[in-house]
Image (cartoon, rainbow, N blue to C red):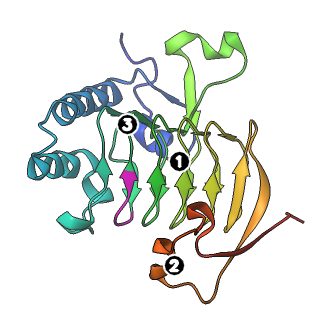
Amino acid sequence: MADEYPQLDHRARMLRGQTYRGVDPDLVAERAQTRTLLHKYNTTDPADRATQIAILRELFRGGVAHLADDEMPEIIPPFACDYGSNITFGKHCFFNFGATILDVCPIHIGERVLFGPSVSLYAAEHPISPTARNGPNGPEYGKPISIGNDVWIGGGAILVSGVEVGSGSTVGAGSVVTRNVPSMTVAVGNPARVVKKIVEDENYTPDMAWEEGADPKLVGIARLDRPE
């Protein structure tokens, strides 16, 4: 289909969070290239880590250029994203099976972030009006998503456009995050709400995780406070 607005730079508008056309030929071609890379990644022998890393570098481009090979994200297939090039990673991130990232706007993922299976990050939006939405031919837009360091996102959780999850936080399995999650908190539910504030044990040592009788979930925690 011919572009009705050829004078507009739809990719630049997309990344700025402005309305853009998802069927813009340049964006369609970029998504097709991404799908080819995703197919290669998802069908690569999981024992061939070197090939996986090479594909991820081509997929994420500058978003992982600062990472050494042993710092690259570990992503268990299948994995899906729109573009890949709009996602930035910190070192030592892990994605379990079935992650989906709609990266029409920048998505920042900090260091040592853990994702359970079937986690979804949706930076994409459509107009609520069905007339304005016009199926796949109408305007689309998005908002960035940011995840701090040392965050754990439980399986099946969804983060919608525009949200930030602060460092050290936990998002419970199945939660739908529609507003910001402060640092060092536990958020659960649909919509997700903060239920605990995390206070770490200042005397924690790694050996404590291996002590007999220790509660694995609470190792390193001094207490969990009620939110204010």
Considering the image in quadrants, where does the C terminus appear?
bottom right
Task: Kindly indicate whether the residue at mark 1 contacts the one at mark 3 (C-beta within 8 angstroms).
Answer: no
Identify residue for label 1.
16
Left or right of residue 210: residue 189: right
Identify residue for label 3.
97
Residue 139, position as x, y percentages in the image: 56, 24
Considering the image in quadrants, where does the N terminus appear?
top left
Mark 2 and mark 1 lie on one chain; the one further toward the N terminus is 1
- Which segment did they paint magenta? 90-94
- Tell me the residue at 39%/43% (across/down): 96
Left or right of residue 52: residue 2: right
Q: Residue 30, relative to residue 86: is it above or below?
A: above
All told, the count of numbered labels is 3
- Residue mark closest to the camera, 2 vs 1: 2
Magenta part, dominant SS: loop
Residue 206, position as x, y percentages in the image: 46, 80
Quick one: which residue is furthest to the front in this view? Answer: 212
Residue 152, position as x, y percentages in the image: 54, 56
Task: Say which amino acid is labelled 3.
Answer: Phe
Q: Is residue 181 visible?
A: no
- Tell me the residue at 65%/50% (across/down): 163
Is residue 157 shown in magenta? no
In the image, 89 versus 227, the foreground residue is: 227
Instruction: Using the image, tell me which numbered label, if any, was put on residue 208.
Output: 2
- Residue mark closest to the camera, 2 vs 3: 2
Q: Circle 1 — which element?
A: loop
Disc 2 to disc 3, C-alpha distance? 30 Å
Residue 97, position as x, y percentages in the image: 37, 36
Disc 2 to disc 1, C-alpha distance? 46 Å
Q: Circle 2 — which element?
A: helix
In the image, 113 versus 148, the foreground residue is: 113
In the image, 155 versus 25, the foreground residue is: 155
